[in-house]
Image (cartoon, rainbow, N blue to C red):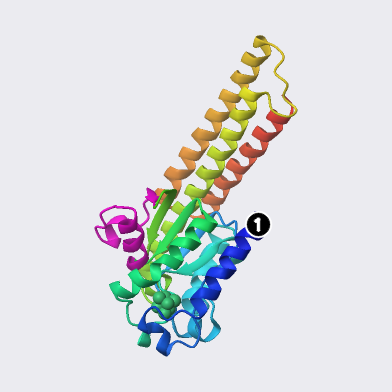
Amino acid sequence: MGSDKIEVLDSIASEIRVCRRCSLWEKRKNAVPGEGSIDAQIMFIGEAPGANEDIQGRPFVGAAGKLLDKLINDVLRLERGEVYITNVVKCRPPGNRDPTSIEIQTCASYLERQIRVISPRIIVALGRHSTKYLFEASNMHYSGLSRVRGKTFNLNFMGLQVKVIPTYHPAAALYNPRLKDYLEKDFLNVKIAVRRENTSGFKQMRINQFFNGGRGNPLKSNAEKRKIYRRLKGIRSRIKAATRKAERFYLEGGDVSVKEREIKKLTKLKRKMREKFRNL
Ligand code: SF4
């Protein structure tokens, strides 16, 4: 499956590198298909390559890329190679102008195929062009970036259920401290969404195990079943309460040490939950 994914993504990238569907090919040095993990849970989608990206053929490698990397490392506690990064438009618009709607429409089929192959749980839309494209492709009304940024939208992107979190483009935040604050805050919401996804996935796995008598948890009698269920319920509600608490804290803002303590507490709870189930 993994090698299939690599093959499909490589073939999309090869098509992009020789593409001449719109006039942007004429002045490009390199097309920029995108890069990252084929199994990424999070996909970052910007609008179009800039000068550095055009030279290197890689997405987000200039100053905006450094800021994006820092947010991925410091806020999400992930490495760049663990996510997937790309743009709506794969070739640099001359002079870093905005891509036109025709260029976006012409190029979007590549992005659509990349999203289908990677099937991320969460897409972070960086800037108004990627947000507008994702909303409109999901039959959602786009009301402006400042209205939707930082919020989580459950979109049906051409049949794929995905959470989309729009935020500002890192390039816009480079010289505007206010936008940089918003960007950091929005990344905390991305972190919360990731944790929720992981918690719900883990919960579902355990519920399936419970009902199916999963490995290491033979359900021999109804009494044992009830006992395991009560324990499962207790642990689930503790995780839920802790997640809510952390979310409230993040949204209200606060110093990093307090945030870190909340994160540690949640991680500890998660570990404890795993241990309890292992002993069932
Ligand atoms: S921007 Fe997209 S559609 Fe236009 S030439 Fe480049 S890859 Fe092709």
From the top left corner, tell me how far across and down residue 162 is, in percent: 44, 50
| Location of the N terminus (image quadrant) | bottom right
Q: Is residue 108 above or below residue 32?
A: above
Badge 1 density bin: few <14, some 14–19, many ≥20, Cα 10 Å = few
Q: Is residue 189 above or below residue 237?
A: below
> Which residue appears at 36% of the width and 87% of the height?
95
Ligand 1 image position (quadrant): bottom left
Q: What's drawn in magenta, residue-wise?
A: 128-157
From the top left corner, tell me how far across and down residue 153 is, in percent: 37, 49
Q: Which residue is mark 1?
A: 2
Mark 1 residue CB less than 8 A from any atom of ligand 1: no
Q: Does the magenta segment cover residue 56?
A: no
- Direction from residue 188 to residue 95 in the image, left or right: left
Secondary structure under badge 1? helix
- Direction from residue 202 to residue 224 in the image, left or right: right
> Which residue appears at 38% of the width and 83% of the height?
24
> Which residue appears at 40% of the width and 55% of the height?
165
Asked whether residue 227 is in view, the answer is yes
| Location of the C terminus (image quadrant) | top right
- Report the amino acid beneath label 1: Gly
Asked whether residue 32 is in view, the answer is no
Q: Out of 210 and 276, give the one closest to the viewer.
A: 210
From the top left corner, tell me how far across and down residue 31 is, in percent: 49, 80
Quarter of the figure with residue 150:
bottom left
From the top left corner, tell me how far across and down residue 190 is, in percent: 47, 53
Q: Out of 166 and 212, give the one closest to the viewer.
A: 212
Q: Out of 157 and 203, give the one closest to the viewer.
A: 157
> Which residue appears at 52% of the width and 49% of the height?
194
Q: Is residue 18 above or below residue 111?
A: below
Q: How many marks?
A: 1
